Each structure stands twice: as C-alpha cells, then as structure tokens.
C-alpha cells in the first residue's frame, strides 16, 4: 500500500463519518505499527551461519585464505582411477565423470575457515524471520549460465523441484517433508517455505546449497535430459568451468569459461585460477604412478601409504622437478572402515559383528603394510570435541538416559566402544581370535568337522568381501585369512569398477571398504546416513544401519539451537553408533599427502577445512616454462 486515495478538499464530513475516518486512521496506524514490528524482526544478511556469527562482514573483499593476486592461466592435471560413462552425477545409474557436478553453482558458497558458514554466490543477500520459517534469496541479476542466458528465480525453483521429482530417493524424501514449497517472487527473488514441526537449523543452508540447473535446457528435451538417467550431455551450469572434451574412460578436460559472470564476486576472488583442468583415467594406481613420474599429469594427491613411503624415488624428485609435501588437514576424518551389510542375516547378532571386528589386526597392518604412517580410528568424530570419551556425564548422560530401553544400559556407565588392540608381530593375534571364536560359539555358530561354522539350521557362516581396488588386496587378504581361521567361510572378490558401483548402490554385498562422511556441524544429512526411513535405499548408508535410538538422537541434533546441546547429542550418537559394531574401524591420516611437479603454488595460509587444489592453487608460469625448457615436461 503506497498511499491513500485523495479526498476532495471541498467535501463536508458528518460527525458520524468523522468517527469512521478516525477509527480507520487508528486501524491504519496500528497496522503500520504491526508491519514495522514485523519488518524489524526480518533479518537481512550477506551470508548465514548455523551457529554463532559470520566471520566476514558485509562487503568483505575476499576470504582470508586466498591469494587475491593469484595469476590466471595454465593447466591443473591429475589422475582418476576407474571408468566413467555419464556426465550426470545426480542418479544411481552409471559412473559419473570426475567434477561433473562442479559445473553447477548454488545460491550460497561455504567458507573454508569456519564451520557451517555460507556467503552469497548466485545470491547477493538473503532475508528470513527470526523463526526461520522461510527464507528469501535476492539473486545477482548479472549471474549467467554458460550459454549466456540469465540465472533466474525460475531456474532455482525448477532445480529444487527437479531434484525432488527425479533426484536420489533418500534426498527427495528427506527434503520434500521439510521444504514443501519454493516460490518465484520476481525475476531474481525466490522464497522457500519450511514445514512446521521440523528444526530450522540447516534448512537455509540446505536450499542455499542446491545446485542450479537451466530450466530451458532441461525442458528443451525433457525425455532424454533427466536427472534419473545417465547421459553424456553435461548440461548447462553457471560455474567457472565447462566441459571442453572427453575420451570415455581415458580423459576429461574442462576449460575456464572466458565469459564467466562471477569473477568479481568476493567469494570468488583468488579462486578458479587455471585455464584448463585435465583428469587422466587409469585402471589401477600402479599405471597412474608411472604416468605421474613421466609427467603425463602433474599433481598427485596420494592415498597409498606404500607409494608415499617407497614410490617417490625417481630422477624428477632428485632433480627438484617434483616436490613432495605433507599439508595440514583440519577436517573431521571420514568414518571409514570395513562395512558390514546389516541386511544380511549373518550380521544380525552383535556378537558376530564383534567377532568380525576382532579378526582385523590394525597394528600389524599399519607397521608391516603401511609403514607406520596411519593412526587407528575409534570414533565417528575422531579427534574433535564431538568425540565421545570416558563414561558419559552431564548433558550427554541425560540424553542417553532419555533413550530408555532403546539402548543397552551398559552405555550409561561404560567408556565408548573403541577399536581393539592387536600385537603387531604377526597378522593373526591369537588372543583376539580366541575371543572372537568364543563370541561365535555363544552366538550359535559352531565349528563342524570340516572346520567351518554353521548354525543350528545347518547354514554356513559365509562372508564375501567385495572390492574394486587392487591397492586393498594386501590389506584385505590377511583379514580374510583371519576370518577363515575362525571357521568362517570367507572370500575376497575383486570385481571391475562398474560391477562394484552397481552392487554397492544396490547393497548387494556382505562387506566392503566404505564409510560415512562427518562434519563439525552435522544436521539433516544424518537422516540419509543413519535414518530409519532412508535406510532401505540410501546410497549414503552403505551398512543400512538404523534404529529408534539413532533416530531420536538425529532429531535432537537437527533441532539443537545451542552448540552445547548439539555437542551432547553428537557425542551420544557417536557412543551409540560405536556400540552397534557395524563397521570394522580402520585408519585415518589427519594430513594431506601431495606430490606435484614444481609449477604449482598455493596460499601461505591454507584454510583448515579444504586443501583447495582445484580452486585455491595456481600455476607459476615461469616455473612451468622452466620445466618445459629443461625437457622435464613436454
């Protein structure tokens, strides 16, 4: 309402009419006062933090951890192992090519030096009430897709709905209930509504992090351009890099879009510094290592301890052409290990799962096969303030007590389950194997005359370990031999990448090497990892673990509005998950191993939560030219 219609000055007012006008005026004043009060409660910001204040003020020039003067140019090249047959990363079919999701931007962009904090990228600002019942994003009108068309609110709403209709089921079912409506308010203004009865924490970052697709591109061929089908068409995004070329299962090349719209945006300053990014595909790590030595690609982020300890002894290292560095990693270590499929009948008894855990000898594996470079993982939030330690006390104890009969009462008075210790002298720790065999006896799996365990129904205790990674052969085989020594009919089956991907997604395995990503601000993603509704189909829950105790703790974590409450419930969840024994915890590194030909440089103050090779590092043109002139690189 802009103003009242003008009243003719010569018109006379009766007393009755005057009372009515006065009453109307009072109502209007009250209305404006209410509106002003409502407007006062609307928060308008340049970013959003789930807890606490944003580190960077409105109008900040750039993130502290970037080099704002980083030169643009050159090529980043690295290796990927396996195959690819699609450029659609949002479906369960096929194997998507490396970086195929990176062509899409979102409304908000995360900070790498503060947890759960996000700043405007495609969105210039956001507005929301204190209740966070909804959020409005004011988009940058200059944002453009790679074909030059504007990124609009229509595209944002379309993308949100497309992910619900054609995206991963676990994502769609979790989000649909919590975010019932997205609405276009204007060409560059979009509003999301959040359902009652759900915690508001992470709702804004959920929608702010949704990839933005081009509505026009999808609608031009809706039958073939679907999110639930593999396709070699990459689609259209608004990000700095676009697909340049590819050779199936051999190579993918991305090039920086010369017309990229967002170089001036503060969250992009000092980032996206390469002209091209090339990914070379190899069938195994040995071939990839030889290619790196020959300079076929020039940066290698190592994950093989044997290679790190022994393979970096070649002329280019001796001559200083290749540098080898260990860089700090402030992220929570991923909760990796040997995952048991909780849908399999042989794993229903926790005593069986505990026995399987005892068959793995971390100390021998680390000392004999991994050169003593790793640390034993115990917790799902290893080495952070969220890790459960000692006997529960204070608020964590109260949280556990509230779970009642849904948990083992021993959790209230005992230290959390931790990985067992083993003797490093030999792969089979006899003490642990004896304990494991006792557990299997107690669970009703008895050893027959042929040395194989069977239950009362005569069913054999079988475990097939599935993998597609030859690097794991030397790790898994001794573990399998220990299982056999306990009377388990265990086998190791290494299959090709495509088969493994399909069987992992369909949860058609007994055990695999896998894990769960964790964060310092866990939220609604926990429903896809450990929630009951998504357990049957979520690709983010390889074991299928779930339960009423877990569900309550996830609810508490998602609804937490104070850091102390979040911490207490995450510690309780850590304690409960560890007690389930659905994974054999293996190892973690706590640092990054990086080797590269000496043409790369990176900021002095790398952030704690990202190594940033692909978006913070850059090429020193003089060093690159020197390597070529010396004949070290072609």
Image (cartoon, helix red, strand yellow):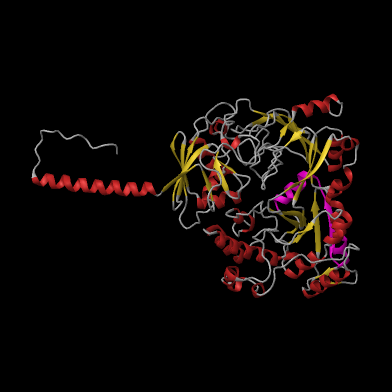
x, y percent for residue 631: 87, 26
Q: Is residue 123 positioned above or below 373 on the image?
A: above
Q: Position of residue 478 (x, y in %)?
A: 87, 59
**Residue ID at (83%, 51%):** 472
**279 left or right, relative to 524:** right
Q: Position of residue 221 (x, y in %)?
A: 58, 31
* Residue 142 left/right relative to 418: left
The picture quadrant where one finds residue 531 is bottom right
Residue extending farthest to the top is 629
Quarter where residue 582 is shown: bottom right
Residue ID at (75%, 34%): 600
Q: Is residue 453 left or right of residue 601?
A: right
Position in image of residue 483 (x %, y %): 85, 64
Q: Quadrant of the N terminus?
A: top left
In the rendered view, tell whether residue 627 sits above or below residue 208: above
* Left or right of residue 294: residue 538: left
Q: Residue 481: within the magenta?
A: yes
How many marks can you see?
0
Quarter placement of the C terminus: top right
The residue positioned 69% from the left and 41% from the top of the image is 612
Judge by depth and name the residue closer to the eye, 544 or 306: 306
Q: Is residue 452 magenta?
A: no
Question: Would you place residue 495 above or below residue 597 in this image?
Answer: below
Q: Which residues are magenta?
A: 480-507
Q: Nearer the viewer, residue 625 or 91?
A: 625
């Amino acid at each position: 309402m802009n103003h009242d219609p003008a009243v003719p000055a010569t018109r006379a007012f009766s007393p009755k009419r005057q009372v009515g006008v006065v009453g109307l005026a009072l109502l209007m004043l009250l209305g404006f006062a209410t509106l002003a009060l409502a407007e006062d409660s609307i928060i308008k910001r340049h970013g959003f933090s789930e807890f606490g204040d944003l580190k960077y003020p409105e109008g900040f020039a750039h993130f502290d951890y970037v080099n704002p003067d980083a030169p643009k140019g050159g090529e980043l090249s690295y290796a990927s192992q396996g195959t690819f047959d699609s450029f659609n990363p949002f479906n369960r079919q096929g194997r998507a090519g490396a970086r195929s999701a990176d062509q899409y931007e979102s409304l908000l962009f995360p900070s790498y030096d503060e947890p759960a904090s996000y700043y405007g990228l495609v969105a210039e600002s956001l507005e929301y009430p204190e209740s966070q019942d909804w959020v409005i994003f004011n988009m940058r009108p200059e944002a453009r897709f790679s074909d030059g068309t504007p990124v609009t609110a229509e595209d944002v709403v379309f993308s949100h709905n497309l992910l619900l209709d054609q995206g991963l089921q676990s994502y769609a079912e979790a989000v649909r209930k919590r975010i019932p409506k997205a609405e276009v308010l204007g060409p560059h203004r979009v509003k999301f509504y959040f359902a009652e009865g759900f915690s508001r924490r992470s709702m804004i970052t959920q929608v702010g992090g949704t990839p933005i697709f081009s509505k026009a591109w999808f609608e031009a061929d809706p039958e073939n351009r679907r999110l639930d089908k593999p396709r070699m068409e990459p689609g259209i995004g608004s990000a700095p890099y676009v697909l340049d070329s590819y050779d199936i299962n051999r190579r993918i090349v991305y090039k920086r879009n010369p017309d990229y719209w967002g170089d001036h945006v503060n969250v992009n300053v000092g980032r996206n510094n390469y002209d091209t990014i090339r990914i070379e595909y190899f069938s195994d790590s040995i071939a990839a290592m030889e290619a790196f030595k020959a300079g076929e690609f020039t940066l290698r982020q190592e994950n093989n301890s044997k290679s790190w300890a022994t393979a970096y002894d070649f002329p280019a290292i001796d001559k200083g052409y290749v540098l080898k560095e260990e860089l700090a990693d402030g992220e929570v270590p991923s909760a990796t290990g040997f995952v048991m499929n909780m849908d399999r009948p042989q794993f229903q008894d926790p005593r069986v799962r505990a026995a399987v855990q005892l068959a793995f000898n971390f100390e021998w594996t680390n000392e004999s096969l991994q050169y003593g470079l790793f640390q034993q993982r115990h917790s799902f939030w290893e080495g952070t303030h969220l890790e459960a330690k000692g006997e529960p006390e204070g608020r964590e104890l109260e949280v556990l007590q509230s779970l009642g009969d849904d948990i083992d009462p021993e959790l209230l008075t005992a230290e959390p389950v931790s990985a067992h210790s083993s003797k490093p002298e030999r792969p089979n720790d006899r003490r642990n194997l004896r304990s494991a065999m006792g557990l299997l006896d107690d669970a009703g799996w008895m050893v027959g005359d042929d040395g194989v365990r069977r239950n009362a129904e005569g069913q054999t205790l079988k475990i097939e370990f599935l993998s597609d990674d030859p690097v794991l052969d030397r790790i898994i085989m001794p573990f399998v031999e220990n299982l056999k020594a306990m009377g388990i009919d265990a086998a190791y089956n290494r299959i090709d990448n495509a088969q493994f991907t399909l069987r992992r997604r369909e949860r058609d395995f007994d055990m695999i090497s896998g894990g769960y990503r964790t964060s310092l601000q866990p939220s609604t993603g926990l429903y896809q990892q450990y929630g009951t509704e998504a357990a049957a189909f979520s690709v983010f829950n390889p074991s299928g673990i779930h339960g009423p105790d877990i569900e309550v703790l996830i609810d508490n974590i998602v609804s937490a509005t104070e850091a102390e409450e979040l911490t207490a419930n995450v510690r309780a969840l850590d304690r409960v998950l560890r007690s389930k024994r659905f994974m054999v915890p293996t190892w973690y590194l706590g640092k990054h191993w990086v080797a590269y030909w000496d043409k790369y440089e990176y900021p002095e103050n790398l952030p704690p939560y990202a190594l940033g090779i692909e978006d913070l590092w850059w090429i020193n043109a003089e060093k690159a030219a020197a390597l070529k002139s010396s004949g070290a690189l072609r």
